[in-house]
Image (cartoon, grey):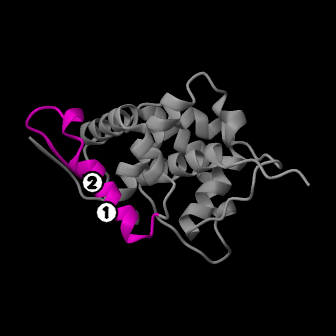
Amino acid sequence: MILLLALAAVAAPVPDPAAIQSLYQVGQCIAARSPETARRVLAMDFESSEYRRMLKAMGSGSAPCLAPGTDYRSSGLLFAGSIAEGLLKTEFNGTDLAASFAFDPARAPIDARSASEEMALCMVMRAPRQTADLLQTPPASREEAADEDLLAPLLSDCLKKGAKLELNRPAMRSLLALAAYRIVTAPKAAAQ
């Protein structure tokens, strides 16, 4: 069985819900089996060739996480988002994620590396409870859609003036998971 998740972050069709759910299970497995590597990769600049190489290597090394006879192909965004969610669930289990996602003046500033990341960081910090609730829903579920609909009005508030961004639901969830992970792992600013 080959599950093909060839998605672009912009105006992509939504793939089969079972394929999305399977991808998230693989990401959670990778986060649980190789947390050090996952943390190291997610800390890298996602626009760098080294990041893309390392993310691809993680995917190639994910055989223990795959059901026998399956092959996964995904956009880097969806794959990285599934790993970020896995790390959030394993490393911050029992933590009030909404409180962790909220703006904290003691946290060092987080420099966004792209307009879409800036938008996602803004959304997570402005709606920490809704983001935490979204990340607790099963991927590609009705609950996920309802939680994303609650977050949708923030999209235009968090985009730079004149910017336009079209995302499908899996891409939005991945962007928010990656931003949430960056937020909870950002160091505290040094005391003045």
Task: Determine the residue positioned at 40% across, 43% down.
Answer: 82
Task: Determine the residue positioned at 63% across, 55% down.
Answer: 121
Question: Left or right of 98: which side holds 68?
Answer: left
- Residue 58 covered by magenta stretch: yes
The label on residue 57 is: 2
- Residue type at mark 1 is Arg
Q: What stretch is highlighted in magenta?
A: 46-74
Q: Where is residue 106 in the image (x, y as percent from the top left)?
A: 82, 47
Name of the residue lying farthest toward the top: 94
* Residue 156 against residue 188 in the figure, above or below: below
> How packed is label 1: few (under 14 Cα within 10 Å), some, or many (20 or more)?
few
The label on residue 53 is: 1
* Labels 2 and 1 touching (C-beta < 8 A): yes
Q: Position of residue 3 (x, y in %)?
A: 17, 46
User: In this view of the protein, which residue sits in the foreground, 87 or 153?
Assistant: 87
Task: Determine the residue positioned at 24% across, 34% down.
Answer: 65
Q: Is mark 1 on a helix, strand or loop?
A: helix
Q: What element carries label 2?
A: helix
Residue 63 occupies which quadrant of the picture?
A: top left
